[in-house]
Image (spheres, helix red, strand yellow):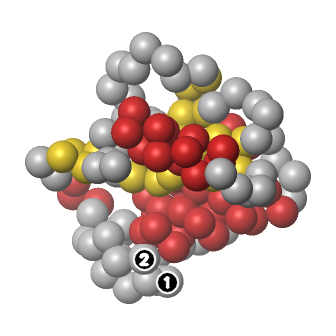
Amino acid sequence: MATVAGGVTDLDACERAASSVLERSSIEIIVVHSPAGAIALPRGEPILFHAPVAVPSSEIAGANGAGDAFAAGLIYALHEAWPLIEALQLAHATAAASLRNISTTESVESWKDCLALASQWGWRHPSPSPHRHQRA
């Protein structure tokens, strides 16, 4: 199942692929991260979507490690028992912070600083999709 066409992430295709994996496994949650946003599919709960941070192009030095930073923010928030939508916010915030340097570690700060940076830059507006259950 193709989830990217012409260099653009198809969030609906990502959701279908993740749903298929969830149905065929014992996994409790699947999170798909892309430049277009993140989709979380928790077993037995509504699907969540969160738009990425609106990082100014002048702040982007490189994307090396951004996916790892996203995962680190998500895992931290889930470990601390944050609500899933807030975990997605922190995940996007840490990924956004990581874009400021070509190093994989130089620009990621504390979770509070990452969220403050995301608050300063704001959130990108997601592409419309008729079946997203919750957006933030």
Question: How far apart, in angstroms, are the residues tagged by discs 1 and 2?
Answer: 8 Å
Under circle 2, the secondary element is loop
- Which is nearer the N-term, disc 1 or disc 2? 2
Badge 2: how crowded within 10 Å, few (<14), some, or many (20+)?
Answer: some
Q: On the picture, is 75 further left or further right than 63?
A: right
Image location of residue 101, percent across then percent down: 35, 76
Q: Residue furthest right?
A: 81
Image location of residue 69, percent across then percent down: 53, 70
**Residue at position x 33%, y 26% from top?**
127
Q: On the picture, is 85 further left or further right than 49?
A: right
Under circle 1, the secondary element is loop
Q: Are marks 1 and 2 in contact (CB under 8 Å)?
A: yes
Image location of residue 123, percent across then percent down: 44, 36
Dot 2 amino acid type: Gly
Residue 94 quadrant: bottom right
Q: Residue furthest left?
A: 6
> Which residue carries the number 2 mark?
65
**Residue at position x 51%, y 52% from top?**
32
Q: Is residue 65 above or below residue 112?
A: below
Q: Residue furthest front?
A: 24
Residue 46 quadrant: top right
Q: Is residue 34 visible?
A: yes
Q: On the picture, is 48 further left or further right than 117?
A: right
Nearest to the observer: residue 17 or residue 77: 17
Residue 84: image tag:
none
> Which residue carries the number 1 mark?
105
**Residue at position x 68%, y 38% from top?**
85
Badge 1: how crowded within 10 Å, few (<14), some, or many (20+)?
Answer: some
